[in-house]
Amino acid sequence: MQQITVTDHAPSLLPDGKQWKLAWADEFDGTELDRSKWDFRLHLMQERHETFTTEGVVVPGDSCVYLNLVEKDGQYYSPHLQTGYNFMDETPANGRYGKFTWPIAEFKQHKFLHRYGYYECRCQLQKQAGWWSAFWLQSPIIGCCPDPAVAGVEVDVMESFRPGWVTQPMLHWGGYGADHKDEPAREPGSDVFFNDGFHVFGVLWEPDGYTFYYDGVQTGHKACQAVSHTDQFMLISTECQGYRTGNQPSDMLKKVVLPDAFVVDHVRVFDLL
C-alpha cells in the first residue's frame, strides 16, 4: 500500500501501482456537522425507525465526528449518517391515482454519489456491546430490478457488532426480500479483532469487483459475484440492538454505561488517474 499525505491529518493507505486523485473528503474539522455532505437516515424499509435519531452527533473541534449512543427514559437511540438517499428513506406520500397509491416517496437531492474508486474510513469502534457501527455503500435504487449492475449493490466495508471485533466484508444485492443474495469476502464467522484506537477500513471498487483492506492489508478475496455499475452513496452508521424485532432494547444494550461513541476521523474517496 502507498501512503497519500493529507496536510494536518492522518494519511490515507491506498493500493500500490496506481495513481490516485482525491475526489471527496470530510475531515470533520470545525465544530458542526457539514450538512452539505451528510444527512440523517431516519427510516428503515420506508417506516420511521424509532431508534434512528438526529441527536448524538458531536463535532468537538478535534477533527473527528462522534456518533454517540443516547438513552432517554429507558429507550436508546443512535445516529445514522449518509451522503445520499434511496427510495426506502421516506414513508410514501399521498401519491394517489384513484384508489391506488404510488409506493415511493418524493426523491431527495443527493449530497454525494460516486462510482468506482477507493473509499476509506478511519475510525475508532464503539467500546461496549448492545449496539453496532458500520461504514458502507448503498444504491439509491437497490433491488429495483434483477440486475445488480443497474440496481446497485450494498457494500459493507466495515461492520462491528461487538466491541473490538469486525465481521467479514459483505455484498448484498437483489433488494432485501425474496430476491436477496449476498457474498462474503471472507468465511462467515472469521471476525477480526482490533485493539483500541483508530483503524483504517477501505474498499477498492472496480468494474470487475471489490477488494477490501484493513489498516492497509487486503482482507479476504476479491468479491465479484455482483458488481454495481451505478452511482452509490456512503454511510457511517450506528444502530441499537433489539429494535428490529421489537420496541425494546436488547439485554446487552441495557447494560451499557454511557458515554459510548463510534468515532470517525475521516472519510475519503479517491479516483484512479
Image (tube, grey):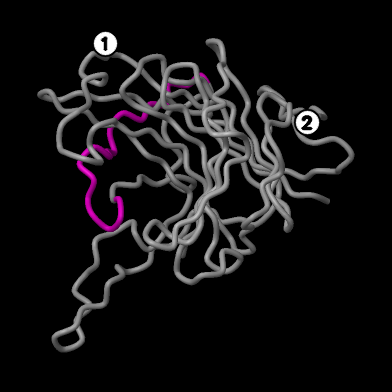
Image vertical order of residue 127 relative to residue 101, above or below? above
Magenta segment = 44-62
SS for tag 1?
A: loop
Image location of residue 254, percent across then percent down: 20, 18
Res 257 label: 1
Q: Quadrant of the N terminus?
A: top right
Image location of residue 72, percent across then percent down: 15, 25
Is residue 56 found inside the magenta-colored segment of the image? yes
Circle 2 packing at 10 Å, graded few (<14), some (14-19), many (20+), is some
Precedes in sequence: disc 1 or disc 2: 2
Task: Kindly report which numbered mark, 1 or 2, lies closer to the viewer in this rendering.
Answer: 1
Q: Give me the residue at 57% from left, 26% from top.
A: 190
Image location of residue 258, percent across then percent down: 27, 13
Image vertical order of residue 103 relative to residue 134, above or below? below
* Apparent side of residue 80 relative to residue 28 in the rendered image (left or right): left
Image location of residue 223, percent across then percent down: 66, 47
Image vertical order of residue 249 relative to residue 147, above or below? above
Q: Give me the residue at 56% from left, 64% from top.
A: 148
Is residue 234 found inside the magenta-colored segment of the image? no
- Amino acid type for the residue under numbered disc 1: Val
- Amino acid type for the residue under numbered disc 2: Ile
* Apparent side of residue 125 relative to residue 193 in the rendered image (left or right): left
Residue on which the image places disc 2? 4
SS for tag 2?
A: strand
Cα–Cα span, label 1 and label 2: 38 Å
